[in-house]
Amino acid sequence: MQSRRGFLFQAAALGSLAAAGLVVGRQRLAMAAPAQTFEVQHSDAQWHQLLTDEQFDVLRREGTERPFSSPLNNEHRRGRFACAGCQLPLFASEAKFDSGTGWPSFTAPLAGAVDTSRDSSLGMERNEVHCHRCGGHLGHVFDDGPAPTGLRYCMNGVAMVFVPVTA
């Protein structure tokens, strides 16, 4: 019979190996994918100068911010949510809703603002959302949202800035 300590040690070791495999697998996929051209392009060094460390991790390395950490969760003024990397307007405030997930959520993007691709990381199939202008990772879209679209664009708040409507 295995001790509790032995079980926990094995579980932690397997979890670490699985996480390492996911990271390596994701890097391999990124290297194998053809380079995409975007209207706004910068080197990693330039992106580092333009973005905070957290913004760089999310937008350029497909990271995820901690849930309930974004001030944009509580942003209820009229305006636009724009890409933090290139300032392209992405979502109208009228499309924002509280999904209870801890990330800013929207029913639909502005026309031509985002692109999607399949994301098979973390052992599941999801639709990843990218900024159309700079290719920055914004979050994922799910089919469990409210009317009128039935979609939930679950975005990383750190990947966006809010621009209020003046007047």
Image (cartoon, helix red, strand yellow):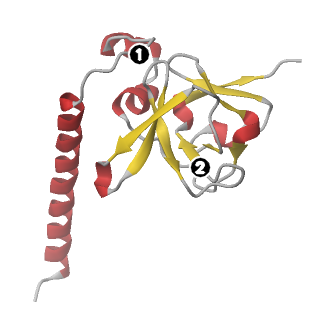
Query: x and y percent of residue 113 in the render?
Result: 57, 26
Numbered label attached to residue 38: 1
Q: Quadrant of residue 26?
A: top left
* Residue that extends furthest to the left in the rendered view of this protein: 1
What percent of the width, then of the height, locates residue 157? 57, 36
Q: Looking at the image, which is closer to me, 142 or 104?
A: 142
Q: Which residue is mark 2?
A: 152
State which tag comes first along the sequence, 2 or 1: 1
Q: Amino acid type of disc 2?
A: Arg
Q: Quadrant of the C terminus?
A: top right
In percent of the image, x 21 and y 37: which residue is there?
Answer: 29
Q: Is residue 147 shown above or below 72?
A: below
The amino acid type found where label 1 is placed reads Phe
In the drawing, does residue 73 fall left or right of residue 24?
A: right
| Structural distance between the alpha carbons of marks 2 and 1 | 25 Å
Residue at 59% in and 39% down: 70
Residue 125 locus on image (x, y percent): 36, 53
The vertical placement of 14 against 48, above or below, is: below
